[in-house]
Amino acid sequence: MNNTVSPALDVNTIRDAFPILQRQVNGHPLVYLDNAATAQKPLSVIDAISDYYKGYNANIHRGIHRMAEEATTAFEATRKTIARFIGAASSDEIIFTRGTTEGINLVAYTWGKQNINKGDEIIISEMEHHSNIVPWQVLCQEKNAVLKIIPVDDNGELSFEIFKKLLTPHTKLVSIVQVSNSLGTVNPVREIIEEAHKAGARVLIDGAQSSVHLDINVQDLDCDFFAFSGHKIYGPTGVGVLYGKKDLLEAMPVFQGGGEMINEVTFKQTTYNELPYKYEAGTPNIADTIALKTAIDFVESIGKDLIREHEVELVKYATRQLEDISGLRIIGKANNKVSLVSFVIDNIHPSDIGTLLDNMGIAVRTGHHCTQPLMKRFDIPGTVRASFAMYNTFEEVDALVAGVHKAVKILL
């Protein structure tokens, strides 16, 4: 039985802010351990969406009536909050997207098409999410460029020495995940950025997982691009952020054409809007963008350091208990990891474990987690992934471990 506590974090009060945690699944209290896929939303975020539609639903930027001005002010307040949250030099460097995937694709299809040529090299790692693999594959195929891969060792850590050897005068971009969504590994992005810049390469950081767990300062890191998704950080789905250094964004071609991203349109030629609107064609996801500020305010009101401390203790506690299960193997044992535990069990498919856990009201993620090359590297079809958030408890870890024990008895 668990005697572990996180005295600095009032988890019970935090849980009260998340209505969905009160529901039952298959007759059991919900144990939600799929936070790396999407985090649940506090009532304040849900209310922010509702308040927009009930109180000041209007299109932004171009309207002169009161509600349009109110919506524009709230929308742009999120941009300012994001800039501060990740340490950007200016809110002009904050581009709203649908999520990390669109942010990476935006860079690939603008900066990439402008700067990658035949024989140039792009470096990614073996642990990348498909959204940080496929856009670069497509670009390399179109440009006849070379995609290089940093290998992962048995503990789920990148080989930094091999990375340095992969860098050449032909390297134009390094695109790397800061925290692995499958392993929880925290990569040494500061050192990676420094080495890449020495070689004359630009660096994009996939912050989909790191933005909710780690303190981010893009100026301190000196990354050239940084992308993350709102729904991983207790905000709505369908809204994300791409940060880019201002000089790079100004020099890049446009991504999509339409309203808002223009300055003047004639049938002869079009001139484009200033940053950040140059990359925000059409009516954006106004309500969810406004609510993203509320999500960040919520996280900051509790404190990332306290949240991170609690989640690390959950990971340690879960790892200790799971490793006692016969035939269970943890995938990803990096010295520096956060937020999740991935595992396999001999002679049992991960999806079978996930199905039985769901019958007990325990939500985990099973499969390849959009990291098929990583699964191939470990010679497994996928893993069971339990990922943790500020509202998870040690009692829920006990329920997970008991559920895995029960599933093993049924399936073996």
Image (tube, helix red, strand yellow):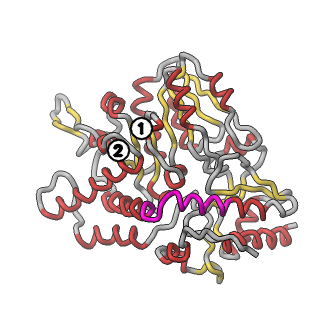
Residue designated by label 2: 94
Q: Residues within 10 Å of mark 1 (few under 14, many from 20)?
A: few
Residue type, numbered disc 2: Ile
* The magenta stretch spans residue 302: yes
Residue at 13% across / 63% down in the picture?
A: 66
Residue designated by label 1: 219
Where residue 9 sits in the image (x, y, percent)? 54, 69
The one nearer the camera, 293 or 406, is 293
Tell me the quadrant of the picture where the N terminus can be found. bottom right
Q: Is residue 236 visible?
A: no
Residue at 58% across / 18% down in the picture?
A: 168
> What secondary structure characterizes most of the magenta part?
helix
Q: What is the magenta range? A: 299-315
Tell me the element at label 2: strand
Residue type, numbered disc 1: Gln
Residue at 77% across / 73% down in the picture?
A: 402
